[in-house]
Image: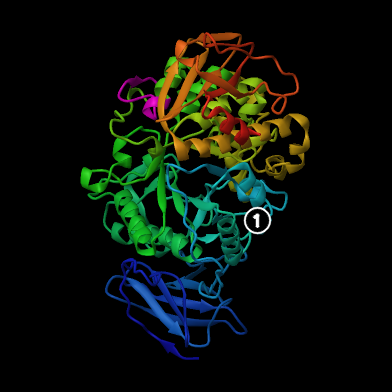
Amino acid sequence: MKVIFHAIESQVPRVRASSWAANLGPSIQEDGCLFRLWAWPNVNIELVLEGEPSRSIPMAPDADGVYQVRVEGVGSGARYWFRIDGAGPYPDPASRFQPLGVHGPSQVIDHNSFAWKDTEFQSPSLRELVLYELHVGTFTTAGTFLAMIEKLDDLQQLGINAIELMPIADFAGEHNWGYDGVSPYAPAHSYGTPDDVRKLVEGAHEKGIAVYLDVVYNHLGPDGAYQSAFTPQFYSSKHKTPWGDGLNFDSEGSKKLRAYFIESALAWIYEYRVDGLRVDATHAIQDDSDPPFLTDLTERVHAAARSLGRNIFIIAEDERNERRLVLPSEQDGYGFDAVWSDDFHHHMRHRLAGDSDGYYRDFDGSTESIAKTIRDGWFFNGQFASHPGHARGTKPDGLSFESRVFCIQNHDQIGNRAFGERMSSQISYPAYLAASALLLFAPEIPLLFMGQEWAASEPFLYFTDHNEELGRLVTEGRRKEFEHFSAFADGTRRDTIPDPQRKETFRLSKLDWTARQGPLHAACLNWYRNLLHVRKYLLSNFKFRLCQALNDKMIHLQWESARGRVSAVVALEGPATAQDEAWTDMALCFSSEDKSYTSDACPVIWQSNVGKLNLQRAGAVVFANEDFAPIVRNIST
């Protein structure tokens, strides 16, 4: 065995057109493997290689505190640990794979051994995106990366062009809803291997589907986060989050921490060819530095996109409605390409499901408010909001529609409910079709949550697999979260909230794909498929021109071109009637009352000569002028 100490540059390397070399973690070379680790200065670091017998090898730091050593004869599959001043052994904070879980040894991965078939895939533009959020562990019965590949045809036929994976960074236990990750470079071992991720990405690209990944840089999970063992500067001494001490993005030692997370983001792009990132809860990242970490992050991701010549977008989840998030850095912005906008969801939940606790009390669900939200991209643009207790939001002047992401369901808005109920389980089927049409005719980027397209009845619950002691605290904390909700004021009622630690809670959250064969589910799937195909046609041939409340029940959305118009009228409840002389040259194309979409149709009354429409219940009607009506009808069938 030959050991060679090797000095390297400690900061994240700038991207290059031909290749990218990670600065942290193991790197296979012709004569062995180079191990690199960021750690506190003036400590004794040992690389521990598993084997018969195991070997301990001292590592030397460079001037910036990156410890490294090159070991001959070590290659892909080797398992290793680190010791710090004799303590440990600990897994690698930049591990690319934890085959035995986050408490086990790290494994060397050869990222260059995978033979990519397609190197020409280009993600759809922001304007074209239709995001489909999913949880790998519950998306299929097997709950693996490889099992997902079998469902890509279904998503392609539906009209999905981008899947968004909930966090896959490895976590403690065998299942987790995703936001307790502790290994930000390593895919969860319970879902499969790193090459399985690559097979999934390649399979998606072959179907014309981009792959986005949800990453979490506001906290690490409560079990298995060994980063602070290597440096006490990992956590902040001045910032707190709902999950404990904040990450140190702005104090002594923060330069290395920022590089650590930025390299993690770039690793997913370069080593796995993902097409975009969704950054979790950016409002919870507390950072007083200039420029802030988030600006550094977006600039590096965009630099990678330019270097690779690919569409690679980065999207923020942020509740503040701050236009700064999607402004470029030269305009004092953070540089995100888009941001989740929850206001649309909240208005729809209040209107259709009656939600009024917590932040829902600031949303009235009126057609006027919903139409305003669609026109502006969010509702609150500086008004006082009672839930945070202060003014919320900024004016969206100059922002594009595609800089906001809309949904009627997502993992948070379902999983954070006590019983994980989906909207489709809580409102009438006609109202669900109406809400779906409103989402897909709006110009913002639509996001669907897995199974939404067939009105899946399975809940999506909050589930964990922590050790017994931590698990007990998680269960207690989960139930305590709901004590301020009127429905759970009674402690006995709170005790009925599913225990996150029970394996049954995880099992109940798995999608049942066979349910799509049921008449109602098949009809709903047909509705979504046809709406998505019509949306694609609209994006290619029209511009969004109009969204208005017609009355207290109906909303009108219109797309226009030089040759004509395509409109949707959505009734959130019925009976509802609207009339407009401008509709007299329009022809009915299809409606949610067609037999393809429902089993108990209520006739739609359309009087084209006077431009009058009547719906007996909630639903949606699509019509167009005579030049386009035959085309839209053909697409929808």
Q: Quadrant of residue 444?
A: top left
| On-image quarter of the C terminus | top right
Residue 542 point in image, percent of width and height? 44, 34
Dot 1 surroundings within 10 Å: few (below 14), some, or many (20 or more)?
some
Label 1: which residue?
A: 149
Q: Is residue 289 above or below residue 556?
A: below
Q: Nearer the viewer, residue 171 or 265?
A: 265
Q: Nearer the viewer, residue 83 or 38?
A: 38
Residue 293 point in image, percent of width and height? 31, 51
At x 26%, y 57%, the residue is 252
Q: Is residue 14 above or below residue 531?
A: below
Q: How is the image coloured?
A: rainbow
Left or right of residue 279: residue 433: right
- The mark tally for this picture is 1
At x 54%, y 10%, the residue is 609
Three-letter residue code for mark 1:
Ile
Residue 380 highlighted magenta (yes or no): yes
Q: Is residue 619 above or below residue 415?
A: above
Helix, strand or loop at label 1? It is helix
Residue lying farthest to the bottom in this orientation = 1
In this rendering, does residue 417 appear at all? Answer: no
Residue 442 point in image, percent of width and height? 47, 30
At x 62%, y 65%, the residue is 100
| Boundaries of the magenta span | 374-386
Left or right of residue 338: residue 617: right
What secondary structure prevails in the magenta region? loop
